[in-house]
Image (cartoon, grey):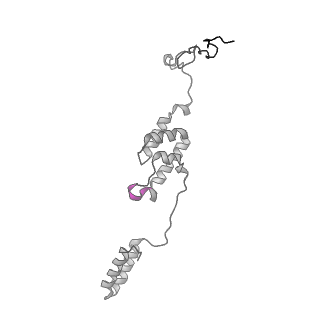
Amino acid sequence: MLRAGDYSMLIPPVPPKRDTLSHPVGTPCPAAMTPAEEPSLNPQLTKTPLALFDRFWSAYPKKRNRGTAERAFKRLAPDDALLETLLAAIARQNRSDAWLADGGKFIPHPGSWLNGRRWEDQEVVEFSSAPPRPAVLAEMEKEIAATPTGRRAGLAELKGALKRGETP
């Protein structure tokens, strides 16, 4: 039964102080170990996520919002195989029309690219049935040059078509 002013039963007990060492009590301090005493390390775990991220960051063409990109990379937790997939996709997409347009204006920020899993995007290949523009122009110039009176009118027609954005 509680007496007036006795709240000791309502207050939880204070947990005992723990050792603040980073290693378990009773084991030698890792900093004091000689190389022969160190536990064997998994080679996959020795590569820090920061080192893997630095490889990604150096390959990515747009250097914006590094902190957001680091957090997205950390959530992804890539291994070496996935990192190679990311780097191959960056190299492939770096040659795409979308990334080359307007001086790289449409390259997504690296964090958005990682969060959107953009390395899995299918590559869009556009095929055009029209011959390349210089070949068409060369053919038209030959035809116009063949007609003596049509040369002046043909050139004006050609210039008008180009101004309208038409393929002659």
Question: Magenta stretch mostly in which secondary structure?
Answer: helix
Q: Is residue 21 above or below residue 100?
A: above
Q: Residue at x 50, y 64 (%)?
A: 126
Q: Which residue is most to the front?
A: 4
Q: Nearer the viewer, residue 60 or 112?
A: 112
Q: Position of residue 119 (x, y in %)?
A: 53, 50
Residue 78, can we see it?
Answer: no
Which one is nearer the viewer's eye here, 24 or 51? 24
Give residue 143's quadrant in the image. Answer: bottom left
Q: Position of residue 70 (x, y in %)?
A: 47, 39
The relative height of residue 52 versus residue 92 in the rendered view (above or below) is above
Q: Is residue 100 within the magenta segment?
A: yes
Q: Is residue 56 visible?
A: yes
Instruction: Indicate whether 5 appears above or below 164.
Output: above
Q: From the image, which quarter does the C terminus lie in? A: bottom left
The magenta span reads 99-106
